[in-house]
Image (cartoon, rainbow, N blue to C red):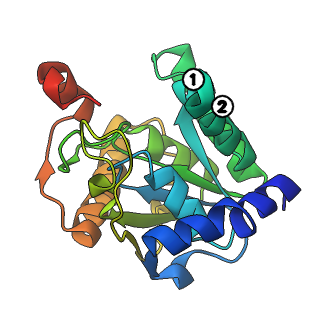
Amino acid sequence: MNLFFWLLKYVFLGPLLKAIWRPWIIGAENIPKEGPAILASNHLSFFDSIFLPLMTERRVSFLAKSEYFTGRGLKGWATRLFMLGTGQLPIDRSGGKASEASLNAGLRVLADGDLLGIYPEGTRSPDGTLYRGRTGIARMVLEANVPVIPVAMIGTTQLMPMGAKLPRIRRVGIVVGKPLDFSRFSGLEGDRFILRSVTDEIVYELMRLSGQRYDDVYASTVKATRPSLNR
């Protein structure tokens, strides 16, 4: 384990966050003790990428938007330090070659036998609804031939509602579901119907675990058509 990550999680930031927000977790035993796997989570808040790695014994690398690594001022410095210290990977979400590079970055994490965190919706939910998943996660699952561990973040959307300047004190939780096995589709990562089926199965499980209402449109589309929901 990276020394800086260990210090951040167990000595400095981790104990402080646990003392303030008292996060709880159910189903932690469903996360494999070793070997590669994808943790597929709903995405309600920036804090999802903090509390999920904090509450898992193994290190989790997320594909994080590049903006988290380029912020200015004290907040930008602290965010960048946390992202780098916990092994988060900056990605360009503009599509095309950038999407291919993100896929390859994730596959490298899995090839090293590590845990990769992915938000199937592709972006934070603007209103707490669970939205349609992007099929990139399915392609990665089938190419790497790894299990998917569905993870529901609970209550993180209330930590910093739209317009809030500081996070609120609210207890947050994590529900970890049973591993999903898609090995029956091995070799079919080029079939778009299979990719959609796998993605929908993952998102359905997230809906079941989280209790969120589901809307079969992309969260990015909702944000584009309703700018007031952007944060």
Residue sitting at x 72%, y 58%? 114
**Quadrant position of residue 29:** bottom right
Q: Quadrant of the C terminus?
A: top left
135 over 186 or under it: above or below = above
Closer to us: 147 or 19: 19
Q: Return the x and y of residue 15 as percentages of the image width and height.
A: 63, 71
Q: Which dot marks residue 71? A: 1
- Where disc 1 sits, the SS reads loop
Q: Amino acid at mark 1?
A: Gly
Residue sitting at x 47%, y 23%? 93
Q: Return the x and y of residue 88 as percentages of the image width and height.
A: 65, 43
Mark 1 and mark 2 in contact? Answer it, CB < 8 Å: yes
Q: Return the x and y of residue 201 as percentages of the image width and height.
A: 30, 59
Q: Is residue 86 visible?
A: yes
Instruction: Tell me if mark 2 has few (under 14), some (14-19) or many (20+) residues whose alpha carbon lies within 10 angstroms of its own.
Output: some
Q: Which dot marks residue 214? A: none
Question: How far apart in space, not on screen, are marks 1 and 2 (Cα)?
Answer: 7 Å
**Quadrant position of residue 14:** bottom right
Q: Earlier in the sequence, mark 1 or mark 2?
A: 1
Q: Is residue 113 visible?
A: no
Q: Quadrant of the N terminus?
A: bottom right
219 over 99 or under it: above or below = below
Q: Return the x and y of residue 220 as percentages of the image width and height.
A: 26, 28
- Mark 2 lies on residue: 77
